[in-house]
Amino acid sequence: MKPLLPFLLFCLPFLGKAQTAPQQLYERLLESEENLSTIVDSYLSIASSAPNYWSYADSVHQFLAAEAPAKLTLFYLEQMIARAPAGEEKYYWQNSLAYYAIEQENWDMAKSLLSTALAECPKTDPYYSKFYYTWACYLYYSGDYKRAQKALEKSLLAVETAEEKSKIYNLLGAISYQYDALSDAEHYFLEGLALLQADSLLDEESESTFLNNLAQLYKDMGALSKALSFHTQLMAIDEAFYGKGHYYYAMDLDFLAGVQALDGQLKLAKENEEKALAIISASLGKQHSLYFELKANYGAILSSLGEIEAAVANYEELLREEKKVVGPSLEYAISLNNTAVAYFKMGKRKKAMQYMQEALALRKGKMAKNQLGLLQNQYSIARLHYYKEDYELAQNGFWEVIQANAKSENWLAPEELLEADYWHPAFFVQSLEALSQLYRDHEQLENGLDSAAFYLDLALGYNRKIRQELRHEGDKQRTLSLGQRLLNRQFQLQLLRKQPVASLFQLAEEQKAVLFQEEQQLGAWGLQLPDSILDQRAALEEEFMALKQQRSRSLESSEKQALDGQIARQELAITAFEKAVKQQFPGYFAQQLEVEALDIGALQQQLATEELLLAYFWSEEGLYAFALSSEKLQLYELEQEGLVEDCLALQKEMQAFTSVLNDAEGSRERYLKLALLVSEQLLWPILAEQQGQRLTLVLDGPMSYLPFEALLSREVALSTPYDSIPYLIKDWEISYQSSAKLYLDQSRRSLYPYDKVLAFAGSYAEGEPASELRSPLLQNRRSVLGPLPAAQKEVAYLEALFDGQFLYEQEASELNFKRHQQEGYGLLHLALHGILEKRQPFLSSLVFTETADSTEDNFLEAWELGRLQLKSNLLVLSACETGLGEYQSGEGLLSLARAFQFAGSSSIVASLWQVNDQSTAYIMQRFYSYLQEGANKSMALRLAKLDYLNGIGEPSLGHPAYWAAFIQLGDPRPIPLAKKGRWADYWPYALGGLLALSIPMGIFRRWKEKAA
């Protein structure tokens, strides 16, 4: 791991000397194999009055500092001080010698030189502030952080240039980092970097220092996406300046391995750590401190991979070498602790305790009580007491760790823990979880289960607080994953405590669509901010996302590297802006911390008499379902063995068009077999006791990929023909919700006051060339999209039926969509191709007709939707896979449909897989016919699907692949729609009857032809 760099990479510009190209003697110094001291003596024999003597002298100094033995470098610097004329030149060499003494940890020399210089140099001389800064560096490196901080704060008042101030801010950040005041460190680093950027003073060396510091800082803060963003740019700089064989590059690889290990990519982490060790071994040797540090990191990766014996062997070898080279140091204590952990994993607890206590004894004399290494050591000992069943010792140990971590000087009572601040917030959550586990597993402790639940509740609350301080969705998702684990444990605890079902339901709801709800809450409150603030934030975010979009589309590695730098700088601008807003409007961010529990009574009042809300909760220890009607709430514990695999297999079978065509009978039997298994586990135990006609579903885990309409209401034989299969849709009207709380919020809102339709039918003619304005990636994506002839029919049907704007072919562009949607339409219908990006959901897109427009690329991506502020009562995405996405714990499916929900559409109809455009056209037309008659959205979609099933002539077209893909998500209420003229009441029936007879058979013929 590369340490923080207070000044090592860019001290020389601060010290006030510019390097000049060396001439004959300096070239001899670089190229000769003779003794360096001989050449130095030759140089010192030159008269100091020779042209450019001092510039060459500085170049020699830089070479010696990098390549020569310390003794020779010190001798040379002392000679330069003796030869230099009084004034600025002498001050420079005095400062350089003091600086070099600090690097060599020659504290007495550094202190003596700087004390003399500060006494002799007039305070009015510009060089006085430089000496004072170097004095602060001496205090920092010698471990006197408090005095270093005071010196820097005093120095900050004296300096004037942005360059000098940035160095001071950087070192203040390093000191804050040592105190584990990470937010303060972030502030100082960002301030220093901003000063250099504002005055165009940022060169590669100073930038690499700040990038390194920020990357390390964000890694320790748990903001891994931010850390990698800065580190990628740093790695490119180090590779360009020093090459892949330099120890800086090895340190970069070590950092990368550390982030990968934290992110669960352990094999990649091991490979990168081995590469780093090989570079350090070749460049610095195996007795260098950096080699020891990286070898310790390598052992941690081996241990995480489960290669425990290899890890122990690695650590024991490291301990032997460190003991010889550095003795009983902090580094040795770290290795002792790491070895202890490895022995613990081997089951050798006595050996582990011996090593941990030895490490703790070393650390207590050398570390502040709140430093993370010391806290982790104490925590590990408490865990060992727990496993040895010394419960009181374990309890006391965990409490001591929590109190030492707190910034309060007073001993905190349990009820004060949540309101306090901590040096290491994530470690505080970990400590609370361990304390809860202790109380849960050993009920003989006072108030065992109650205390366990109390501390888990605190951990959940503080984890939420940490998440709301993060900006990256990736980082927020990691806290959601931790939150889900804590919630699972809390749920099991509440079951053991026999808590009311209502409390369990509220707890399960806490982790549903979390980020979505927080964005809505923050967005609503954010309207109270000045327009100028909101506009500035929007502009910064838009530029940031545009850069990420550009990088994802780039095919050139050099261009990607350049964009990495721009993305990192833009991210700095956003972070600095948000910190300023927090200081100016603290209530804006404090509002996020208020979490409102689900009001179950209010939700029951909103449910229809015949409605059943079924909310699933999939935990590590069990699968549960809450069945809520207007009158009662019940909890079901369901069988989950094999269910994950069955759900995924059923999803695959449901969309198997080719399988239906090539093996209709086999496809039906495979589908029925899986549907019976899944339905028996997920539905039958509940529906056997429940009555109703409307089923509102809040899904969780792998079941989120399934349309429940195509599950079964009862058991049937595998030979059952399609027209006799008891699909759930035949008995129930079905809609889907992201969470019960969002459903309640939607039901309380009024509909938007719009009743017109905005519809688009994209054109993707075969052989149609993509615009040369587009990137090669976009051209390639468009080239594989086939025609959608039925899209024109869908929109033509709507145009005959409703009033509004109906755009086809060249008019169906992204620019027209963004322009017209601002006018306000109650219904948006987009008959377009969709592209799903599972790895980068924010880049999933709807593809409009290519128009060679220079302002829009006709790929409307998910990240752009948040800027549109849609106000539609219904959005229909008549496209492929618009409801499908990557499932994320605590958030659900990250799909295009979800992105449109973020953008403001209260209800969405979208597809879960690639659909046949003919069956889509038929179902969509029937759907709109029923919607126009006043049916609610979920009922209209149900009736359209039943019409399809009842009207097909070919039995195999009853397979769910043809009709089950479309689902209705969100507010199911009916919506007002403006009819177009008096013929609108009659025309759909005539056309609808024709479609009912012709389209299903047409589907079969088209698919047969394609298969042939």
Image (tube, rainbow, N blue to C red):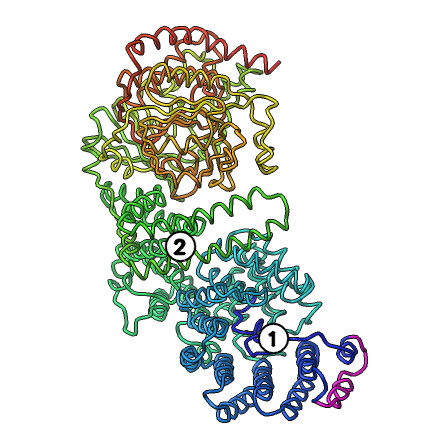
Q: CA distance from mark 1 to mark 2?
A: 38 Å
Q: Secondary structure at mark 1?
A: helix
Image coordinates for residue 998, horizontal then vertical, percent:
46, 7
- Name the quadrant of the N terminus: bottom right
Where does the magenta region start and end?
31-48
- Identify the image quadrant of residue 45: bottom right
Image coordinates for residue 768, horizontal then vertical, percent:
59, 24
Q: Is residue 708 visible?
A: no
Q: Height in image: 114 above or below 665?
A: below
Q: Residues within 10 Å of mark 2 (few under 14, many from 20)?
A: some
Q: Height in image: 315 above or below 93?
A: above
User: Is residue 431 within the magenta segment?
Assistant: no
Which residue is under mark 1? 322
Which residue is under mark 2? 470
Image coordinates for residue 392, horizontal then vertical, percent:
33, 67
| Mark number, residue 294 | none
Q: Nearer the viewer, mark 1 or mark 2?
A: 2
Q: Secondary structure at mark 2?
A: loop
Q: Report whether 427 appears left or right of 848.
A: left
Q: Identify residue type, mark 2.
A: Leu
